[in-house]
Image (cartoon, rainbow, N blue to C red):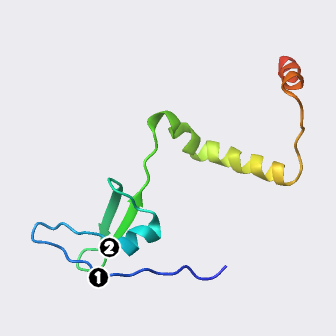
Amino acid sequence: MGKPRVVEEVAKVNERGALTIPSQVRKAVGLEGNALVVASAVENGNEILLRVQMTIDRDQAWFWTPEWQAEEKKSAEDYDQGKITRMSADEFIREIENW
């Protein structure tokens, strides 16, 4: 896998401080209308970093907790190593009734 391509364009900040992110830059990161970005700058520096802010529905936040993601990773590793059991829905129900 090669080095990621950097897309760089010049943009102008207007008198109110508004910035239009050039379309090629937006396309490179999949930024669509009404998206949120986090702007960061180092004081006394000359660089501004814009990061796409991912939003998660509150009722799905549990899935993205570090604990749940660790279990997801372990499950994927088990699957990749063939440590799975295939069964029908009826077999599964009988199995969990014994838990």
Figure quadrant of residue 31: bottom left
Figure quadrant of residue 48: bottom left
Q: Amino acid at mark 2?
A: Pro
Circle 1 residues within 10 Å: few <14, some 14–19, many ≥20: few
As displayed, is residue 67 above or below residue 4? above
Q: Position of residue 16 (x, y in %)?
A: 11, 66
68 relative position to 59: left or right: right
41 relative position to 7: left or right: left
Q: Residue at x 89, y 50 (%)?
A: 82
N-term mark: 1 or 2: 1
Q: Position of residue 27 (x, y in %)?
A: 43, 68
Q: Amino acid at mark 1?
A: Val
Circle 2 residues within 10 Å: few <14, some 14–19, many ≥20: some
Of 70 and 39, nearer the camera is 39
Instruction: Please count the marks in the image.
Output: 2
Q: Quadrant of the C terminus?
A: top right
According to the picture, the residue beneath numbered tag 2 turns out to be 22
> How far apart are labels 1 and 2 at the CA level?
8 Å
According to the picture, the residue beneath numbered tag 1 turns out to be 10
Element type at marker 2? loop
Q: Position of residue 33 (x, y in %)?
A: 34, 56
As displayed, is residue 52 above or below residue 11? above
Q: Report the residue that reaches farthest toward the top.
A: 97
